Amino acid sequence: MIQSVKVKNLSLSKDNVRKSNRDAGIDNLAANIASQGLLQNLIVTPLKKAGHFTVKAGGRRLRALQLLIEQGTLPVDHAVPVLVLSDDENATEASLAENFQRVPMNPADECTAFNFLIQKGMTAEDVARRQGVTTRFVEQRVRLAELAPCVFEALAAGEITLGVAQAYAVTTDVDRQARVFAQMSTSYYGDNPDNIRRAILNGTVKANDAKARFVGRDAYVAACGRIDGDLFATQGDENWIDVDLIETLAARKLEAAAAELAQAEGLAFVTPILATHVPYDLERQLHEFHAADRSLTEEEQVRVEALGVETDDLVAALESGLEDGTPDAVTVNDRLAEIEREIEEIDAARNAVDPAVKAQLGTFVYIGGDGEPRVHARLFSEKPVIDPNASPKATDGATGEGDAGEAGDVEQGPKLSATLVDELATQRRQILVVLISTES
């Protein structure tokens, strides 16, 4: 039977099967309970004193709860759900089952979960604090979540160890990771992390590698790049020997693309990333910028509604019997594609960034898997963005009479109430009247 019991009425049973390492990780567990709450009830048996129980399973959770109460994080009368068993023999069996049947979480699942939280907008520090781990631990798991799919799947399946996966993560280039993984899968020493690191940082490049495709075969050969030819292989299976040359050529080309993009878009910076994705640890060093969506204008609203009606009519026409591939069906589908593009353009206009703000922003450019340059979807700034179009704060105490002071002056004293401001203005007028009368 599940019931709610105050923590102060619970005590640890001497029959709990966990005898070693009872206090290991209590601080981390307490931090997790503080952020997530108690996700699993305790298993208890009643004591002779009414309302008091001994904990047969869940001793670490009890100590973590007691620690939170000592720290003042939880109130002294905090209550938790417990499963009450009347039989001590069953309680001992339950304690054994809870500790013996526990399976450690797969590192790949940890990586996916941490990466999901990061993508939802949490920082590594936030995740670490809420999960009771270090920030470095979170960053390491996020880095592993960005491994090449074949390497990550092997980690999830238990085919490689966590240490091996970390060896592949020595580079953020997933193409190189995948290539070395394929080589190491057939090697006798392919599960040795040191061998993997050496292979990751050396070796040759296939012609269909993203960087090779980005550089181009002609440019590589023109720069005296060597190719290990194979009469029986396709051009994409060629081995390009001079890896450093490929890196240099790719870096130059990407830097030129970044400079061109920065000038064309009016950005403060565009950072080239010589990889097929932008690592999270580079993003976290900057301030992410989110443009505020403006409301649709009346004209845009009317147009969007008209396009919606037209879309409904076209879809109804397709569903009414137009056969795929017929000229009429092709015309309808082409028009639907045009409507979708127009709506996307209208939506993009809502996100337009003021040039003065844009001049403070930047982004990343990297190499896509197809060898084409890709622009990162988000904008960033090195410092908090200042909007020059934002209305300046009124000077405190301004009454609207006489000079308000030099432009840009901001009064540093305490803010005066409206009543006091009015009273001071009245006194000022009275003094002026007296001075004028005296002079005349």
Image (cartoon, rainbow, N blue to C red):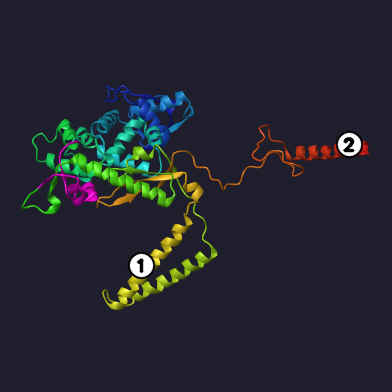
Mark 2 = which residue?
A: 435
For residue 207: magenta? yes
Closer mark to the observer between disc 2 and disc 1: 2
Q: Residues within 10 Å of mark 2 (few under 14, many from 20)?
A: few
Q: 283 or 44: which is nearer to us?
A: 283
Q: Residue at x 29, y 44 (%)?
A: 252
Magenta segment boundaries in residue numbering = 201-228
Q: Position of residue 225 (x, y in %)?
A: 16, 44
Q: Residue at x 80, y 39 (%)?
A: 425
- Residue 15, picture quadrant: top left
Q: Position of residue 230 (x, y in %)?
A: 7, 49
- Residue 329, picture quadrant: bottom left
Q: Amino acid at mark 1?
A: Ala
Q: Residue at x 19, y 48 (%)?
A: 222
For residue 128: magenta? no
Disc 2 + disc 1, Cβ < 8 Å: no
Question: Which image quadrant: the N terminus?
Answer: top left
Q: Is residue 421 left or right of residue 384?
A: right
Q: Is residue 387 left or right of residue 22?
A: right
Mark 1 = which residue?
A: 337
Q: Is residue 406 left or right of residue 24?
A: right
> Furthest residue to the left?
231
- Residue 6, picture quadrant: top left
Q: 2 or 22: which is nearer to us?
A: 22
Q: Secondary structure at mark 1?
A: helix
- Marks 2 and 1, Cα distance to the nearest angstrom? 78 Å
Q: Residues within 10 Å of mark 1 (few under 14, many from 20)?
A: few
Residue 189 vertical position relative to residue 238 in the rendered view, above or below: above
Residue 173 vertical position relative to residue 70 in the rendered view, above or below: below
Q: Amino acid at mark 2?
A: Leu
